[in-house]
Amino acid sequence: MKRFERRGKKLVTSFEPEEVQLLQSLVQQLVELITEHGRRVEESTPAPAQPDDPFAFWERDLREHPDQPEVPEDPVLQRLFPDAYPHDPRASSDFRRFTEQDARAAKLAAAQVVLDGLASCRDGRDLKVPLDQADAWLKTLTNLRLSLATRLQITDAESAELLSELPEDDPRAFLYGVYEWLAFAQETLVQSL
């Protein structure tokens, strides 16, 4: 991958075909993880009330258990959708109830922008990211890095440094290399802005 460079109203780079495939695979896995979590949340949520029946809407709203927030079990999802109020279960539940669906939709929309961009740069063509899509790219790269950091148990600079010293035959070494590659993409994208 080359550094992102600004050319007019676009940010341009080029990827090797293998890099395009890797990034597409990572983004698709992220989409699947978020989508699957969304299905589980929606399945556990009672059916929406009829719009013309405010009492049914309030009944459904009150039936949910605000003292028991639905924190995802997967540590990656916990990192992508963090507990806003870890010491206040009720506030945490309310926050999740009112924001998680929109946050999930925003992450999926940003990921789709990245997938569309990657589809356009197959066959060795340069990737050209319009300035108005740079935010979606940055958010998706951040989500991918958070996901990998969670799987690799990177919590600070020291734990990242330890991973950089892994022997090449350690399976985590490849993932750490991908994590660093995403950091390079993200850094050069920011610099090109």
Image (cartoon, rainbow, N blue to C red):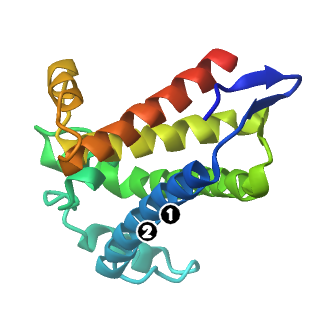
Q: Quadrant of the C terminus?
A: top right
Location of residue 117 in the rendering, given as x and y in whole percent from the top left corner: 72, 51
Q: Total number of numbered labels?
A: 2
Q: Nearer the viewer, residue 93 or 134?
A: 134
Q: Is residue 170 at least partly visible in the picture? A: yes
Which residue does the image show at 31% across and 46% down from the upper left?
A: 175
Image quadrant assignment for residue 18: bottom right
Whether residue 67 sits left or right of residue 97 in the image: it is left
Question: Which residue matches tag 2?
Answer: 32
Question: Which residue matches tag 1?
Answer: 28
Location of residue 67 in the rendering, given as x and y in whole percent from the top left corner: 13, 57
SS at badge 2: helix
What amino acid type is highlighted by mark number 2?
Glu
Q: Are marks 2 and 1 in contact (CB under 8 Å)?
A: yes
Q: Nearer the viewer, residue 70 or 75?
A: 75
Q: CA distance from mark 2 to mark 1?
A: 6 Å
